[in-house]
């Protein structure tokens, strides 16, 4: 291997967050030595804010590196002679999304961690390491690199899910996610091994060239790989872990997982289907059809009976995975662009909803039950209005970005001939309006509770404001931008898809 042929700029986004995680760990060690035992709580809060600032800088640099590559049309492999990682429009676009999701999650954590008395510096290091794993997975063009990125992403998130060590629900969340995540990784790895045995290749291009749809070994490997990814995207019937993990994990971690892990898993599945597989016929489409239908039906109907907002949003996440899979069933370039657009707007809707739950946490406890939102409009009208906006957007009410996301997905399905699947998506979206509106009903039509919620911090307000602005703005101007021509989201998603080899 000739070192001069290596394209080191391909590793730019990964390098920035990796260096940031090391800086956070070293920073906590050196700063903690200077803590005055009599002023420990204040000192920990200051250290936490400083570590959050380091994380912010590293994520901003990573987002800038990915954005620079995307808007300049960069398409390069780290080692052209043996490509493992590729910085192309799709990977750089997805890294921007994941980077923004991680950045907003960091800002949500600044005051949330002290409120729950879990303000430990390794939190930010774990979050950055998980983000680095997502970047590796997103940019992978080789199954070995996919698995490396998957494990680098998963192991820190197992720890983050159980980060509230004094809370039994958080312990249960971390343990369940570890066991089921390890099981899913084993299935995925076995599928990769079978594909290697059937094709003699681990790189996507080699698998595509040698894949034989009539080979039982190749088909078995493909099925196991799809099942492994189905666990990661929380698709029915591989969704059982999602509600318990979302409920038990600290809310800032749940917010981070709900948008970044989903985005990473969907993007690498899209890359795998596009780059590693030839036309395999209607059988794979039938599998995605069933997964999409089951996810939309089970996710929406199970959300109806939930009394915990985090569990409600977990089943909502399962339903949204079903909507996204509709785009995979359609399989056209327009449908795949609609999937990327949906992932963008879903990030703002879901982070905003979880951000309100974060803002209500105080006194070492979460306020995550629907009853905790009773009368919130009287005590905190601003938070109530924001939560209502995010619930309406998740339901797909016209005028919000959520409506436009579903419109593009279902339109692509209709154009591809999957009319009944689109109809099922619309009907289940109508069902979702009922449970999404339960939260605004509790806030505006229930009696006020005696407990006064804590004031939202400036960082939380920034996140909620940005999410609300994105939900409204991109609901009105999804692809016709009167202010910033570069923010035509659907065009950007189309560019990312169109330039995939």
Image (cartoon, rainbow, N blue to C red):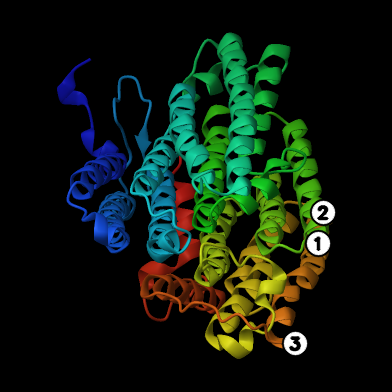
Q: Viewed as shown, does residue 440 lie left or right of 358?
A: right
The Cα atoms of the two marked residues, 1 and 3, are separated by 25 Å
Quarter residue 444 falls in: bottom right
Where is residue 211 shown, x and y percent of the image? 60, 18
Q: Are marks 2 and 3 in contact (CB under 8 Å)?
A: no
Badge 1 crowding class, 10 Å Cα cut-off, few under 14, some 14 to 19, many 20 or more, is many
Residue 43: tell me if it is visible: no
The residue tagged with tag 1: helix, strand or loop? helix
Q: Which residue is mark 1?
A: 428
Judging from the image, what secondary structure is the residue with disc 2 in?
helix
Q: Position of residue 397 (x, y in %)?
A: 69, 76
Q: Nearer the viewer, mark 1 or mark 3?
A: 3
Disc 2 target residue: 297
As rendered, which of 432 and 94 lies closer to the eye? 432
- Residue tagged by mark 3? 445
Task: In the rendered view, tell whether residue 304 sits above or below residue 446.
Answer: above
């Amino acid at each position: 291997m000739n070192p001069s042929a290596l394209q080191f700029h391909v590793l730019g986004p990964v390098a920035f967050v990796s260096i940031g995680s090391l800086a956070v760990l070293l920073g906590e060690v050196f700063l903690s030595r200077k803590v005055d035992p009599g002023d420990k709580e204040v000192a920990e809060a200051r250290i936490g804010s400083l570590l959050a600032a380091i994380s912010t800088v590293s994520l901003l640099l990573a987002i800038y590196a990915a954005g620079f590559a995307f808007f300049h049309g960069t398409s390069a492999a780290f080692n052209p002679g043996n490509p493992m990682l590729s910085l192309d429009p799709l990977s750089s676009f997805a890294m921007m999304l994941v980077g923004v999701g991680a950045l907003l999650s960091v800002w949500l954590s600044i005051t949330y961690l002290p409120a729950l008395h879990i303000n430990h510096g390794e939190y930010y290091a774990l979050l950055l390491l998980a983000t680095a794993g997502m970047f590796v997975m997103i940019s992978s063009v080789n199954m070995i690199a996919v698995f490396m990125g998957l494990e680098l992403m998963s192991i820190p998130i197992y720890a983050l899910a159980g980060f509230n060590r004094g809370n039994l629900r958080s312990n249960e969340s971390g343990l369940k996610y570890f066991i089921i995540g390890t099981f899913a990784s084993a299935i995925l790895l076995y599928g990769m091994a079978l594909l290697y045995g059937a094709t003699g290749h681990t790189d996507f291009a080699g698998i595509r060239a040698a894949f034989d749809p009539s080979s039982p070994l190749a088909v078995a490997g493909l099925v196991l790989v799809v099942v492994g990814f189905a666990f990661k995207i929380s698709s029915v019937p591989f969704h059982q872990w999602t509600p318990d993990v979302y409920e038990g994990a600290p809310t800032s971690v749940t917010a981070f997982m709900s948008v970044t892990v989903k985005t990473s898993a969907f993007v690498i599945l899209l890359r795998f289907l596009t780059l590693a597989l030839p036309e395999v016929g209607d059988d794979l489409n039938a599998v995605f059809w069933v997964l999409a239908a089951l996810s939309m039906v089970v996710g929406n109907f199970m959300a109806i009976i939930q009394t915990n907002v985090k569990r409600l949003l977990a089943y909502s996440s399962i339903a949204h995975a079903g909507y996204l899979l509709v785009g995979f069933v359609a399989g056209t370039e327009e449908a795949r662009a609609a999937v990327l657009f949906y992932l963008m707007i879903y990030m703002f809707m879901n982070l905003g909803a979880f951000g309100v739950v974060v803002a209500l946490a105080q006194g070492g406890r979460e306020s995550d039950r629907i009853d905790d939102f009773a009368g919130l409009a009287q005590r905190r009208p601003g938070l109530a209005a924001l939560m209502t906006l995010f619930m309406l957007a998740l339901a797909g009410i016209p005028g919000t970005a959520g409506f436009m996301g579903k419109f593009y997905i279902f339109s692509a399905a209709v154009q591809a001939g999957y009319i009944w699947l689109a109809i099922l998506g619309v009907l289940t979206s109508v069902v979702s309006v009922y449970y999404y509106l339960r939260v605004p009903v509790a806030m505006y039509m229930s009696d006020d509770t005696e407990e006064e919620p804590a004031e939202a911090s400036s960082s939380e307000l920034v996140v909620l404001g940005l999410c609300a602005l994105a939900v409204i703005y991109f609901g009105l101007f999804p692809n016709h931008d009167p202010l910033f021509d570069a923010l035509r989201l659907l065009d950007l998603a189309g560019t990312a898809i169109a330039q995939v080899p």
